[in-house]
Image: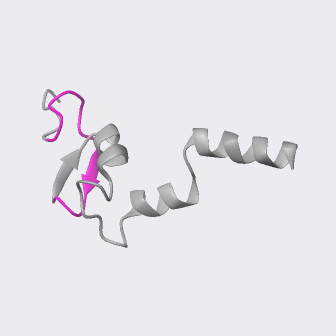
Amino acid sequence: MSQRCPRCKRRLPRRKCPALGYQICAVCCGTKRLVEINCPSDCGYLASSKAHPPAVVQRQQERDIIFA
């Protein structure tokens, strides 16, 4: 598998993007989701991202609970 992600041309594409119709890398999926890529509401990666906030957001929420 020597092909690279068509969006960034750097990493291996491993996620099938329903909006684009081809595979992209996880980094492009995560950073371009709903910004450059118009994700459909039934995208599994979009649903997963809503269920699991980024680690930095989660740590801030935990700190807010401690200081509240």
Q: Residue at x 29, y 55 (%)?
A: 35
Give the main secondary structure of the magenta stretch: loop
Whole-percent x and y of residue 68? 87, 50
The image shows residue 6, relative to residue 68, as above or below, that is: above
Q: Residue at x 24, y 29 (%)?
A: 11
> Residue 46 appears in which quarter of the rendering?
bottom left
In the rendered image of this protein, does residue 63 appear above or below residue 21? above
| Direction from residue 57 to residue 20 in the image, left or right | left
Q: Position of residue 65 (x, y in %)?
A: 82, 49
Q: Is residue 8 covered in magenta?
A: yes
- Magenta includes 23? no
In this rendering, position of residue 57 left or right of residue 24: right
Residue visible at 30% across and 70% down in the picture = 40
Q: Position of residue 30 (x, y in %)?
A: 37, 46
The total of numbered circles placed on residues is 0
Coloured how? one colour
**Rendered-image quadrant of the N terminus:** top left
Left or right, 48 with reference to 45: right
Residue pictured at 57% horizontal, 60% vertical: 51
Q: Is residue 40 above or below residue 12?
A: below
Apparent side of residue 51 relative to residue 41 in the rendered image (left or right): right
Residue, far front: 68
Numbered range of the magenta stretch: 7-20
Question: Residue 48 placed where, x, y %?
Answer: 49, 58
